[in-house]
Amino acid sequence: MDKIKIVIADDNSFIREGLKIILSSYEEFEVMATVGNGKEAAAYCRNQSVDIALLDVRMPEMNGIEAAKIIAAQTSAKPMILTTFDDDEYIVDALRNGARGYLLKNNDPEKIRDAIKSVYNGNSIFQDAVLDKIKSNLSGREPEPKIDLKKFTEREREIMSLIAKGFSNKEIAKTLYISEGTVANYITSIFGKTGLEHRTQIAVNYLTGKGNETWNPG
């Protein structure tokens, strides 16, 4: 089995080296490099074969949000944010700019391990606490852009709701009693109607737009 190749970006050397030690203890991971800012992380991902870029938000020269945008657009690596509650104001921007997951540093190593593997396998990871932060930060604020739910079928709305909860295609299929292929077809349709490119953007735009709609998913 090929190892999941990881680069860690954090301006705190103690944290990044500690993460390297922890993640390297798992046989499925290979920590390729640790760097101190987003600029170095983006450059490394452009020049090396990386699967996951684990990014802090607040870093000198280039922060994790800017790095996630570049990494998502210009490389095959999947950016993930690993940060603290203090950075909750950045959550929506990070996810809109290509981050495939948003985790808090107070997680157990096993949870971080599982999240990395899930993102590697094509899923998006949102902690309940992070979802609550998104909803809280957006209350009373005009979202931009937002999804007009009237454009979608009831089934598409159900699927967007489950994506926003962090469900994988397999979990959605099991919940709605349909095949994974059917789920994929619905997601393709949602992409076509929104112009979005990946499921993380669906989740964020669903959450930001839902507040102005009277429809409430079951």
Image (cartoon, helix red, strand yellow):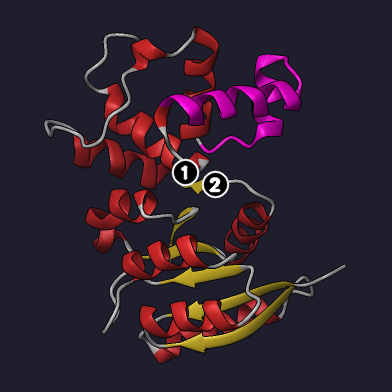
Tell me the SS state at disc 2.
Answer: loop
| Label disc, if present, on residue 189 of the rendered structure | none
Query: Alpha-carbon neighbours of circle 2 within 10 Å: few (<14), some, or many (≥20)?
Result: many
Left/right placement of residue 143 relative to residue 100 reads: left
Image quadrant of residue 170?
top right
Question: What's drawn in magenta, residue-wise?
Answer: 166-193
Identify which residue, 9 or 156, lies in the foreground: 156
**Location of the N terminus (image quadrant):** bottom right
Left/right placement of residue 57 relative to residue 54 reads: left
Label 1–label 2 contact, CB within 8 A: yes
> What residue is shown with label 2?
124
Amino acid at circle 2? Ser
Q: Is residue 184 magenta?
A: yes
Residue at 53% x, 38% y: name it. 166
Identify which residue, 26 or 197, lies in the foreground: 197
Residue at 34% x, 56% y: name it. 94
Against 11, residue 1 (above or below) is above
Residue at 37% x, 39% y: name it. 204
- If you read the primary sequence from the N terminus, does the residue marked by circle 1 or circle 2 appear first? 2
Left/right placement of residue 28 relative to residue 122 reads: right
Residue at 54% x, 46% y: name it. 124
> Residue 78 location in percent, x, y?
55, 61
Q: Is residue 3 magenta?
A: no
Amino acid at circle 1? Thr
Against 43, residue 57 (above or below) is above
> What residue is shown with label 1?
200
Q: How far, Cα to Cα, is label 1 from label 2?
A: 6 Å
Against 191, residue 30 (above or below) is below
Q: How many marks?
A: 2
Query: Alpha-carbon neighbours of circle 1 within 10 Å: few (<14), some, or many (≥20)?
Result: many
